[in-house]
Image (cartoon, rainbow, N blue to C red):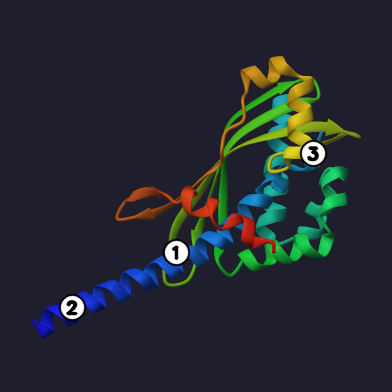
Amino acid sequence: MKRMMGRTIKTLTTVKTSRQLASSIAQGLAVLLLFVASLTTATANAATTPEAEVRGAVEQAFQQLRSGNYNALYDGLPSATQKRLARERFTAALGRTRDIYELDRIGIEAVRVAGDLAVVDSIIYGRARGPLAGDGKIVARQYLVREGGRWRVTTGDRVSVAPMLAANPGFAKKYPPRQPRVYLRRDGRWVDVSNLLDTTKRRALK
């Protein structure tokens, strides 16, 4: 009986510890998710088609995010976002994620452009660090608007997204918003931890 109780207590302790570790990693991922939109803000290059132009901007800015060039990313954020979010807060929050999550690559699933509006469906791959280290991915739909010769993302910025979609109902109906999903690979399969993020992302920037 004592042996059984000992195993039970050990199991409960392990579960509690795992949940705490998962929560810590999830909080870090939440910060990353809040700013993953910034990876698609970049100066458009001389691409041959609008789709290729948007794709090039996404890939170029992702490398900035991956290398930790957060100041450049901040400079490319929409002005409305910069007014609400200080540079120091932005760079510090992203800097903290480097100890929790390491970006690897981005997979662009689809690019659609309609005038000065664009939508990109992408998957961002990386690795969670620490005791729960393992492969991870973020599946997101990102909206972009072309302003001043630059593609500026509005994903994660509802104040910008809502007016844009309201002013373009046809575009919004064709490409409705999707809730970003975050996954960690466990035992050979992808486990959706998005619900865990819902309870931690509001605390991440406090």
Q: Is residue 153 visible?
A: no
Residue type at tag 2? Arg
**Label 3 SS:** strand
Q: Amino acid at mark 1?
A: Ala
Residue receiving disc 1 = 22
Q: Where does residue 106 sit, x and y in percent of width and height?
A: 58, 45
Q: How much space separates mark 3 and mark 1, taking CA atoms?
A: 32 Å
Q: Residue at x 79, y 38 (%)?
A: 152
Q: Residue 153's image quarter?
A: top right
CB within 8 Å, label 1 to label 2: no
Q: Is residue 116 visible?
A: yes
Give me the disc on residue 152: 3
Residue 7 got which mark?
2
Q: Nearer the viewer, mark 3 or mark 1?
A: 1
Determine whether 74 is above or below 53 in the image: below
Label 3 is placed on what type of residue? Arg
